[in-house]
Structures are given as C-alpha cells and as structure tokens.
Image (tube, coloured by chain):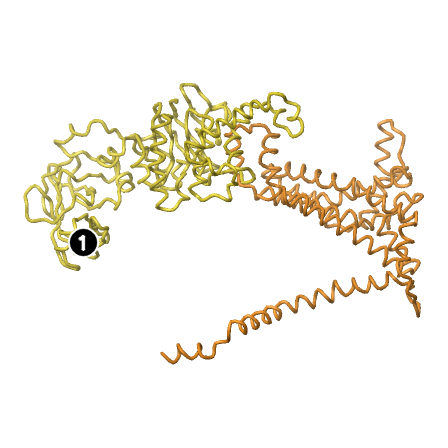
Amino acid sequence: MATVALSSIAKSFGSTKVLGGVDLEIAEGEFLTLVGPSGCGKSTLIRIIAGLEHQDGGSVAIGGNRVDHLRPHERRVAMVFQSYALYPHMSVRANMALPLTMSRLKLWQRLPLLKLLSGQRREVMRGIGADVDAVAAQLQLDHLLDRKPSQLSGGQRQRVALGRAMVRSPDVFLMDEPLSNLDAKLRVHMRTELAELHKRLGATFVYVTHDQVEAMTMSDRVAMMDSGAILQLGTPSQLYEKPASLKVAQFIGSPAINLLPATVAAGGRLEFFGRPMALAVPAAQGQTVTLGIRSEALSLAHGETGRASFSARLRRKENLGSEYILHFDLAGHTQGVTMRATPATAAGVNESAEVMLGFDETAAHVFGADGDRIEPRGQAGAIGSVVPLRAGA
Amino acid sequence: MTLALTSPAAFAPTARRRFRIERFTGLGFALPAFILLLLTILGPLAVLLLLSVTNYEFGGVDMDWVGLANFQKALADPIIRRSLVNTLLYVAIVVPGGVFGALLIAVMVHRRSRTRSFYEVIYFLPVTSTLIAMATVWQFLLHPSLGPVNGLLKWLGFAPIAFLSEPSTALATLAVIGIWQLLGFNMILFLAGLTAIPRDLYEAADIDGCSSGIDRFLTITWPLLGPTTMFVLVTTMITAFKIFDTVAVMTRGGPVGSTEVLLYNIYLEGFQYFHTGYAAALTFIFLAFILVFSAAQTFALDKKVHY
C-alpha cells in the first residue's frame, strides 16, 4: 500500500504534446480510474507512473518518495497490460514466478550452467514455488500452472497476468485497459472480480480505461482526462451528478446526456424553446447556453408547473427488457433526445406521434459557451465540493 | 420446389462413389506438383544414382556396371577423406561465427532508430556482391607483401602472415571470408525475428525486474528467437557445407591440400577429370551429409523452440 502523487507531469512525443502538467494525488489503497477518449494521454500517464516512459517535466512520488530516477522494477509497482504481455515460451508457473526469481536470485544464479553451482538456489526456488502456488490458488489457476499461455482462454490469460502482478505483493497495481480484449460477458464478470480483489488486497489500484462503465462501476474516484489534462476528478457519482464541463457530461453516462440550447434573457433568466424558465444563471443577456438533461430526467409532460417542456416526435423505441429507451426527433434540431421510460409509459407512445416532453428544471445541467458548468443562481450552495480541476490552464 | 429438392437425392452418388470421386479430384490437383517434382528433383536423383554405380566417363560411348566400387573407392581415398575433414572443419568455424556474429550485430542494429537502415545496408552489402569478385579484393587485402592487413600487422610489430599460402591458416582464412559473406543475410533474418517480438514483453520484463541487458536477452530475446535461430542454423550449415567458390578462385585446394573441400573435389572429378560415375558417387555422399544435418537440426531443435 502506498500513495501515488503526480505533480505537474508534462510529456511530449516530438512536437505532439500529450500531457500538459498533470497533478494528481492518489490515496493509499484507493481505486482510481483514469478515463477518457483514446489519445487523451491516460495510457502515457500510467506508463510514466510505471517508469516505462519518462516525463519531460514534473515528478512522480510513490509512498511519499520521489521515484523519477528509479527503474520500473525498483518502484514496487506491478502492471497488467491490455495484451497481458505473458511470456509465450514459459508455462503459467514460470510466468508467475519470474518477478520473484528476478528479485530473489542473484544474476549469476540465473545464468545457464552457472546456476547449477549455487547451493541455495534450490531452497530459494522452493520458496518461490510456494508463493506462486498460494497466488494461483487465490485466482483458481492451480490446475493451469503447467500450461503455456497459448493454451489458455482470454479470461484465464487475464488472470495469469493478474497473478504475475500479485505474486510480488506490490504497493501499487497499474492496469492499462486490462479488460478490453475480453468479450462482453467476461468483462462484466471480471469487473466484479477486480473490484473484489482490490478490496481483498487493499493495495492502491490505478486503472486506465476508455469505458466509462468500468470507470463508474469499480472506482473509488475517477479522473476524467481529455487532451492531456484532467477535466474533473471525483467520485463516480460526483462526475455523473455534477459534471464540471460539457465534455465530462457527454462522456459519462449511457445513453449519452441530452444537450439542448437555451438563451439567456433579461436578469439571467433562461429561455427554453421560446418559453421562459424559472432557472437563472450568472451570464450576460443574449448568450446561448447548453442544457444537459440525463435521459432519466425526461418524462412525458402533462402541463405541470416548475417544469420545462418541449414537443418531440418519437422515432424509435429500444426495448431493454426492464425499461425502454425512447428516441425522439426535435423539429428544427439535427440532434434528437433520448428518454428512459418504463414499459408501461413506452406502450402509451406511438411511433411518429408528437408528444410533449418535460423535465424538472433543477435536474438540468447548464454549460456556458466555453463548455464549463454554470451553477444556476440560488443553487450555488448545493454544489460546494466539486471543483473542476483544470491542469495546465 | 419439391422437384428441385428431391431430384439431386435420387441421383446422389453413394457414399463410396463420392469417396472415390473426392480421391481422384485430390490426386488430380496434386498431379502437376508431383510431375514437376519428378522432373526437377526425383528424376535427376535417379540418374545420379544410376551413374554412381557405373564407370561412366563424360563423352564416353559405353559404360560398365561397377556396383558399389565407386563408393568403396571414395571412402578409401585419402584425398576425399581429407576434403571431408576440411569441409567439416570449415563448417565448424563458419556456423558459430556466422550465427552468433549475426545475432550480435542484429541485436545491436535493432536498438538504433535513425541509423538502423544505414547499418542494415552496410552489413547486407557482401550478400549482394558476387563472392568471386569480392575474392579478388580479399586476395589483395590478405596479400603477404602488398596487402594492407599485413601492412597493419607489420606496423604493430608482428611478423607478416601469408594467410592464403600457409597450410595452417588458409582454411581458417577462407572461413572468415565465408562468415563475412553470411553475416548480412543472417542479420536480416534475426532482425525480422527481433521485430516480431512484441514490445509489451520487454516492458513487462522491465517491470518484473529484468533490468540488465543479459536478463532481457536470456528471458525474452533468446527464447523468442528460437524459431529464427533454428532456421538460420540449418541454412548456415548447408551453405557452409557447400563451400566451393572461394576455394576455386583463391586457393584451388592448396596449399598442400589444406583447403581441399568436398564440393571442389566433386568438381575436379566430374568436370576436370571427367570421372562422371565417380563424381556421382561423391555427390551422393555429399547429399547424405546435407540430409543428415537438416534432419538432425530439425528434430533436435523442433522440440525446444515450440511454444
């Protein structure tokens, strides 16, 4: 167990700036996920923590000590790769034992022929064997120890890669998209298994993924990255309920958040589809802002007060079994909206029927022209804790 | 519709007939390749075998059946024995030098990023040039009095060495030239093998504690180059066993037979003395060696390199 502290990490590949001064504090035993679209710099960041890549500026500290000058294996971190990176010519047992043979045997004790001269070698190897067996038992790999990686299924390889990481009992586990090569069903299963493993080991996990579902389901905290900077750092629910910017709102949540334009009228009052809302924002009159409304915040409108409404035409119903996703077209808009509905509600709406949709105004997220979140007046007290983290700005 | 469905069934061949048709089709497809094999390899081999049991001389009008006399003669001939020993000695120098030298160069060239193609071209040049032409250059370089190599030796205070006219050094000198010729090609093969090793593995090894070059080489590079190494080993062995051109151009088997090699003797018997029958028997012995080499290599190494 150890903390990981990154301070103003910068990295460029040639003329391409990949990371622009990232600050991040990861607590002891935390499960922190770096999430973002591909090319956002999340993989580079985890590789810098591992020591596989060297930062151009800033420093990395693990357990309070700066590790910038240390080689990967000296940092007491373990890494699970997207491709698993198992040694194809070694058995599962040898794969898992490698980190231990490297640390417990001296160089000459590992060299061919010369190793036969060592008296202690057998003793050490026995100890390594016992440790490997213990980890293998934890991961239910005992019956696969003599197989080669090519004889294993994707899920089994994944577990061997985990075992190889665990066997050294590192302070920090680094995982670079470890589930993306698995099929959908196995991925869901491994999500649970990883989260449980984290709880059992109590080690610090840094997890990279482009899948927001993985980020939401497993993490203690999520750092949403884009263009080499952390856009927002917070718990999964903070990111979902109070997205700090339009990009975060769009990335987190499935189906994607609905975005609709509104204009600022006199006194900061918002005007939505030509009708005034109760919502007021600290913005100049005449400005256009974007309202972000989650699909579950929408419902069929029956002319209640305190709710904004607009008319839409049903394009398609998507049946998920327990609920429906209704896709609507809006007159004069290229982007439609999606709404979650119970089967009963969905049955009441006919295809291509024109209906009124409404939402509770307090559930709407307001984003300015620059994409930053604007807190509506009179609600400012409710937000408090979420401070958008804009590194490099 | 019903008709279309039932009629094929009515005319469908029995299982046995279908099996026979499939078999003939298969043979039909294999036939062209087999004919080609027969004409280009098996046929000439049969002719060779036939000649090796006769006393046929090139241009002669008749020949006699001599049985295994040619083979008996060859095995008893001290010149042939010596040339066989020389050939094996040459192979024993060229194979380790040509394989491990190329591996070393490949590993070093592989790490260069910008200058890699430059080194690749440099090391590959000897492969593209004809050895006969390059032999002239070597002859000049190694000349006892005019050559720059001996010039350097003299400058360093050593006695000059007559590399190619001294019986004790001639074969080794030819072997060095042989290695020089082979390095580039073997290097390219090893480079291809190195490129195929995923970078992830080195990174995983780095995290697992393989920090030194030796550890990385022994844990990842060497085992994963297994298939490449096997191929390079077999081809180098066969190429080395076929040594002929440098001997023919530079030493003609001398001095005092110290560079007589098997293929050169076959050439002498067959094309200089016109003992075609005897040369055929020698060629058979030569082929038997090559076959044993490749078979032994393949079986011995195949078990180790598969993963």
What kind of element bears circle 1?
Answer: loop
Q: Please provide percent x and percent y for residue B133.
A: 81, 50
Rendered view: B119 above or below B284 = above
Of the chain colours in the picture, the one used for chain B is orange
Which residue sits at x=55%, y=29%? B210
Farthest residue, direction top: A64
Residue holding disc 1: A330
Q: Please provide percent x and percent y for residue A146.
A: 52, 38
Q: Left or right? Give the position of A41 relative to A359.
A: right
Q: Left or right? Give the position of A389 relative to B117.
A: left
Quarter of image, res A1: top left
Point out the image quarter for the N terminus of chain B: bottom left
Q: Please provide percent x and percent y for residue A53.
A: 48, 32
The residue closer to the viewer here, B240 or B183, is B240
Q: Left or right? Give the position of A21 relative to B256.
A: left
Point out the image quarter for the C terminus of chain B: top right
Q: Please provide percent x and percent y for residue A226.
A: 35, 37
Figure label count: 1
The residue closer to the viewer here, A28 or B57, is B57
The residue closer to the viewer here, B223 or A6, is B223
Chain in yellow on the image: A
| Residue A224 visible in rendering | yes
- Kind of residue indicated by mark 1: Leu
| Residue A55 visible in rendering | no
